[in-house]
Image (cartoon, helix red, strand yellow):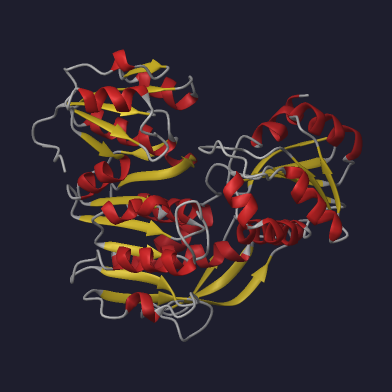
Amino acid sequence: MYQIDFSHPSSIYFVGIGGISMSGLAELLFSSGFKVSGSDRSRSALTETLESKGITVFYGQRAENITSSIDCVIFTSAIGPDNPEFIAAHEQNIPCLTRAQLLGQIMKQYDTPIAISGTHGKTTTTSMLSEILLRADTDPTLSIGGILKAIGGNMRIGGRKLFVTEACEYTNSFLSFFPKIGVILNIEEDHLDFFKDINDIRNSFRRFARLLPADGCLIINAQIPDYREITKGLPCRVVTFGAGPEADYYPADITYDQSGHPGFLLCGGNVPPTKVSLQVFGEHNIYNAVAAAAAADLLSVERSCTVQALHDFTGADRRFEYKGTIGGVTIIDDYSHHPTEIATALKAASRISHRTLWCVFQPHTYTRTKAFLKEFAQALTLADKVVLADIYAARETDTLGISSENLQKEIQALGKECYYFPSFDEIENFLLENCINGDLLITMGAGDVVKIGENLLGK
């Protein structure tokens, strides 16, 4: 594998530079003196930010963008072997790295790299820990899979002591990392276009845990079924979090205020139980906060600092994000695209005062929709009324004979009112005609469904 010499900055080209992670890494290298350029399919807020910093961005991916002056080309897992820039780089024998391999090499430049993994909750937990470390004045370098208001983006370039990043299991990308502190929030079936089954996924997380050095630490959710299978034989310290005192860290006396925000006593860490109140919704965020607090304790952050930062945290972009109110209808947007995430988000929404809970769901990928068709239907019944958009294909081209109409039939068979429209315009017009004062509308999915709420607020 090609090794970047960080003491002698070179020329790095990013294919797909506008991605949430790629753009942050491009910015980090540019700030370190590297000559950075790249391409993306279309202009976006992220590419415009890169250009404003002096980074060259090509729109459209073409072979002629790859020149002999480039020392290394970075690809994401979404780039296939038929990509013209991929082909050109290999024809010219230019060294190539995946995004994960680059991120792994960057992590080795820091004293304490921290990688937060799990099927769900990575962005929120990474953001929570980031807020804590910022409040503690630790000057962390942060790479987040979403936009964090506290830093005005997805990347913060700080000192060389702490590096915090998300660690995604898809295509085993997190196995290219070099963490000293690792977090495993949960393990469930997902990305079945890559993994064979849950056992294959668990094996991947087990391999991730093995990356931790003897002087490192793994923070793991003790509610993961047979979690000791993951931790068995690890040379590093293991810290658990969970629902009760059998875990090293756990919440007690959970309550919810009138707005639906949770509060709890944070127990663990050899300090007295500490009252925590959150400004984000849902039981899942209690456990995200506990995991972030456990990591903060490892980094010797004062508990009072952790508690204040968690209270001040208002969420990451597209994670149960309040978008606005129109005609008395409250609009929230959420990134959930897995049945467990959907159920969790809708349960959180149910705690907010409302007349009718509407969910506009955009399924993400044909593979996931087909694999979890019945589970999606069951989760969506937690809304009062469901509206479906077309499946967001993302990286996929094969429909597998599945569509949103299949999901609509499953939901209707469960006795739930469900509508399907093939265009966002039709969905928006339907909602304008049917949502009334006091209703709660949540747009949900990992695609571009967020535009529906934003368009409604603009109408």
Residue in view at x 84 percent, y 29 percent: 429
Decide if residue 55 is on the left or right side of residue 222: left
208 versus 365 height, above or below: below
Between residue 353 and residue 32, name the one nearer to us.
32
Q: Quadrant of the C terminus?
A: top right
Q: Residue furthest bottom?
A: 246
Residue in view at x 49 percent, y 64 percent: 197
Tell me if I can see residue 309 in this picture. Answer: yes
Query: Residue 373: x percent and y percent?
Result: 68, 56
Residue in view at x 43 percent, y 33 percent: 19
Query: Residue 49: x percent and y percent?
Result: 41, 23
Residue 80 occupies quadrant: top left
Tell me if I can see residue 281 in this picture. Answer: no
Q: Residue furthest left?
A: 8
Between residue 338 and residue 96, name the one nearer to us.
96
Between residue 219 and residue 86, name the one nearer to us.
86
Query: Residue 104: x percent and y percent?
Result: 24, 48
Q: Quadrant of the N terminus?
A: top left
Q: Residue furthest top?
A: 64
Residue 453 occupies quadrant: top right
Query: Residue 363: x percent and y percent?
Result: 65, 45
201 versus 101 height, above or below: below
Q: How many marks?
A: 0
Decide if residue 383 is on the left or right side of residue 160: right
Decide if residue 182 is on the left or right side of residue 386: left
49 versus 319 height, above or below: above
